[in-house]
Amino acid sequence: MVTRRELLLGTAGGWLVEQVWAGEAAGSASADTLTALAGKKPLIRRALRPPNFETPLADLAAPFTRNDAFFVRYHLAVVPHVDPAAWRLQIAGASAQRPLTLSLKELRGGFEHVSVVAVNQCAGNRRGLFTPRVPGVQWGNGAMGNARWRGVRLRDVLQRAGVAPDALEVVFDGADSPVLPATPDFLKSLPIERALDENTLIAFEMNGQPLPHWNGAPARLIVPGWVGTYWVKHLTAIRIEPQPFDGFWMKAAYRVPTGAFPGRRFASQENAETTPVTELMVNSLITSHVSGARLRRGERVELAGKAWDGGASPATSRARACGAGSAWSSPARRGTAAPASRGWRCPPTAGRAGVRRRCSLIWDALRGASSTSPSTPRGPARWTWRCGRAAAAARSSPTN
Amino acid sequence: MTGAGRRAAALLTAPVLAGASALLWAAAGAEGIQLKDAPGRDLTTGRCILCHSLEYIPSNAPAMNRAAWQKSIQKMKERFGAPITDEEAKQILDYLDGSYSGKS
């Protein structure tokens, strides 16, 4: 539990360690403020409280995103430092046959350890790049990261508690809480089948290290392929329930128009108008060049980027240039990624900048044969303000 | 958070709300953000920073107009339980619309 003093310290900016300008650090013209939370390198500050910090483009280039560069996203401003020795995880609910409570030692020692590589991406990533602009945290490209997560299968823990045949959803609560008692606490639910999926984990390690505080220590949920809103941090309670969970963050937030997007449906939370956002959509990002980069005509360009999606079939990608007098297109490649990975792929590609004037470099991500990402961020304000789900190909526009 | 934790949080926040407005004001300064000077700024700052720092206001301005601000204030009041009276809500709306409506 956070003390009053800690709350006020947090309120008064006690999280702050260092502040620089993104423009100076990244060599870009961006006026974004970089601020370091304790234990993090300077990240793009979208909001100090609740903490919302974005990974700079340069830190998205590596195959795995460093823990101290990994984005931070909270809805509620009271984020206690959890003592791992005192931490307990409660597993209960109307459809739990043998409710139990686990210490971190019992969680680590009582179940098989497994790891998965997966992209954690906020549902609202790239909201700030939409035209027209939509309200919400104005994320650029960096409300995401790729990591190797290690922990135990949620399934194994749930089965220890006994999953009754009538189980419909599993509800997750974390230690973070609102400032005002009247504000809805951040609880999320998963359909029982997704909770029992072998890749859904309770993780206590990230890239071989204990989870950083700002990424959910001592244990968080990992839901590979699903948007970050389900990856509940600082887990404290899990409930197996026979009814659809009725909380604000399921019924009123993170919803999109029913039938508007591909991906898994969350049937017990769906109504005729809206449905919860679930899987990541096929997506891509150029990491080697920033928008507005200048190239010499004929220069050989080494392009680097990522392709990822939330489905079982990983994204392939290809780079191409378009615009007046533009040059080249690379064949679609899969790149390399860990086996059975839900992480992003980073195929290398190169070409010569044959452009005369302004052109766009586009990094297409493809799922299967037919699905490709749209070339610009888009989406009607009606749904994007609610979820900001950005299905965007990264676009860079070099000139010479 | 558990039920017990929630009750503790409720006990915790009551004195904070009652007795720490000066500290919260200091917090707005420490967070390095000041809203534009216009009538209603102090009220808006005082109510908003109870739960969140002020970056949200300028960063969202390009997406906002009067109707959007009205909706946002209503959401804070009704969904998130922000302690804002109807009269205060009107002053806050006038201020935000006057200073931070960037959408045509």
Image: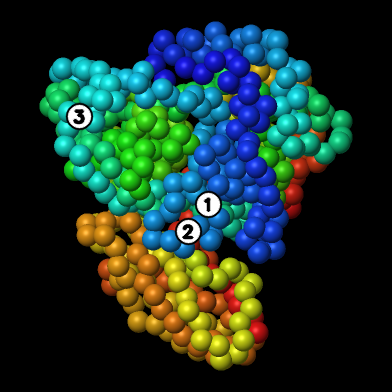
Chain letter of mark 1 equals: A
Where residue A88 appears, as percent x and y from the top left, is: 32, 20
Q: Residue at x 39, y 61 (%)?
A: A63
| Left or right: A98 as drawn, with respect to A218 | left
| Residue found at the very far right of the displayed protein | B38
Report the amino acid beneath label 1.
Answer: Thr
Q: Name the residue that disc number 2 marks.
A: A60
Quick one: A14 or A339, which is closer to the camera?
Answer: A14
Q: Say if B16 sits above or below A348 in the image.
A: above
Quick one: A233 or A138, which is closer to the camera?
Answer: A233
Quick one: A42 or A184, which is closer to the camera?
Answer: A42
Say whether mark 2 and mark 1 are on the same chain. yes
Q: CA distance from mark 3 to mark 1?
A: 33 Å
Q: Name the residue that disc number 3 marks.
A: A109
Q: Residue at x 78, y 36 (%)?
A: B34
Q: Say if B14 sits above or below A219 in the image.
A: above
Q: Name the residue that disc number 1 marks.
A: A55
Which label's residue is closer to the chain start, 2 or 3? Answer: 2
Where residue A355 appears, as percent x and y from the top left, is: 58, 88
Quick one: A264 or A382, which is closer to the camera?
Answer: A264
Chain letter of mark 3 equals: A
Local packing at callout 1 (Cα closer than 10 Å; few below 14, some 14-19, many 20+) is many
Report the amino acid beneath label 3.
Answer: Gly
